[in-house]
Amino acid sequence: MAKAARKKASKKDLILQKAAIMFREKGFAATSMRDLAESVGIEAASLYNHIRSKNEILEAICFDVANRFNTNIDSLESSDQPSIRKIESLLRFHIKQMVEKYEEVYVSDREWKHLEDPFLSNIRSQRRNYRKRFAGMIEEGISRNEVKKIDAATAVLIMLHAVSGIESWHRSRAKINAEELEENMIMIMIDGLRK
Amino acid sequence: MAKAARKKASKKDLILQKAAIMFREKGFAATSMRDLAESVGIEAASLYNHIRSKNEILEAICFDVANRFNTNIDSLESSDQPSIRKIESLLRFHIKQMVEKYEEVYVSDREWKHLEDPFLSNIRSQRRNYRKRFAGMIEEGISRNEVKKIDAATAVLIMLHAVSGIESWHRSRAKINAEELEENMIMIMIDGLRK
DNA sequence: CCTACCGATCGGTAGG
DNA sequence: CCTACCGATCGGTAGG
């Protein structure tokens, strides 16, 4: 019974993992359950022994990723580093997640619009909330004179989208490694392009 | 005859415009020709008097946007400003395009994967080429000592994705206006967050 | 986990 | 530009 439960869980995990890969490649809407079943190695109908619906797969991916980012910002906010260090840590977490859990993070970021209510409203408010907390860290940095006077909301948009640039790095198997990538990104975002 | 041709062109333009709005909202794959026809105000079958296929609409959007960006980088490369100014101008062009032609630029950037060959290969190579030229401007800036020593390819990824952050600004109708947005973005990207 | 199948919807065409 | 309709494919279910 324990073994059966473990087995079932790992098959569901396999489905989620393959789904993340396919949703990233083709998009949620353009991926059929038959495509997914084939990549898992079973018939389409058999998927439904492990998951309830196509949308449930997307929900699992999106909320799993959201939880990881929320947990991280929780612990950052309660720490007492300088603001610019908090911001740097947040960015480094985004970069690491994008490198290590590429497909899941990418899918949760680009395909969440295909969720249905109540999950759609939920994720929307989680995203709004996250951006607000990030903006709060930037405003704190401005008031402490660690960050230059910019519009915090604009800075949040730039930073969050900038890290998603790793997508292209990930697929192109560029010349530089993950560590160099991270250092370059942090340098550019914290100190800009100009020498 | 001239008038009929003009009329037909403008109806086709209306279809392209409505398609860009819907492809941005729901994605290419999740937008049906019946959805599109409804927003244009005709029956689905009637769309085919103006366009040949659903994919042809996406092709028109993607290549129109690509041409505008290529024309801009052509004229920038042949100018003889300092490298950092060329980079700034390129970024300003991206920001302006994103503000003014929001739906088309967004769609061409996120939905081009749904193109079919030979258009898919064509746009892929155009994108590769554009990034290479942009990286060349950054490397020129480094060698002229105007830009700090960073990996040019990484900087390109960050900058191109950062400007697409305007998407969220555009939809959220934020407090700041387009001009302030542009100045904030340029300041952050050129000089970074740190004071 | 499979075979067999469902109603719905898709992109697109014929013919007027 | 519409009515009528097509073959294909979709997400999902029944029953074993």
Image (cartoon, coloured by chain):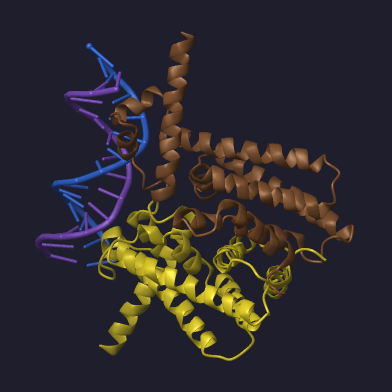
Chain colours: A brown, B yellow, C purple, D blue
Q: Is residue B180 above or below residue A27?
A: below
Q: Is residue B34 above or below residue B156?
A: above
Farthest residue toward the top?
A: A1
**A124 or B192: nearer the viewer:** B192
Q: Is residue A12 above or below residue B119?
A: above
Q: Residue C12 falls in which quadrant of the image?
A: bottom left
Q: Is residue B18 above or below residue B8?
A: above
Q: Whole-percent x and y of residue A138?
A: 79, 56
Q: Is residue A132 visible?
A: no
**A192 or A23: nearer the viewer:** A192
Q: Whole-percent x and y of residue A121?
A: 60, 42
The N terminus of chain B: image quadrant: bottom left
Would residue B177 be found to the left or right of residue B157 on screen? right
Q: Whole-percent x and y of residue B79?
A: 56, 91
The C terminus of chain B: image quadrant: bottom right
What's the residue at 43%, 68% (across, down)? Answer: B128
What's the residue at 66%, 46% (across, down)? Answer: A93
Farthest residue toward the right?
A: A144
Q: Residue A44 falls in which quadrant of the image?
A: top left
What's the residue at 54%, 73% (across, down)? Answer: B135
**A174 or A54: nearer the viewer:** A174
What's the residue at 50%, 82% (across, down)? Answer: B72
**B152 or A32: nearer the viewer:** B152
Q: Whole-percent x and y of residue A135?
A: 76, 54
Would residue A190 be found to the left or right of residue A1 on screen? right
How many numbered callouts?
A: 0
Q: Is residue B47 visible?
A: yes
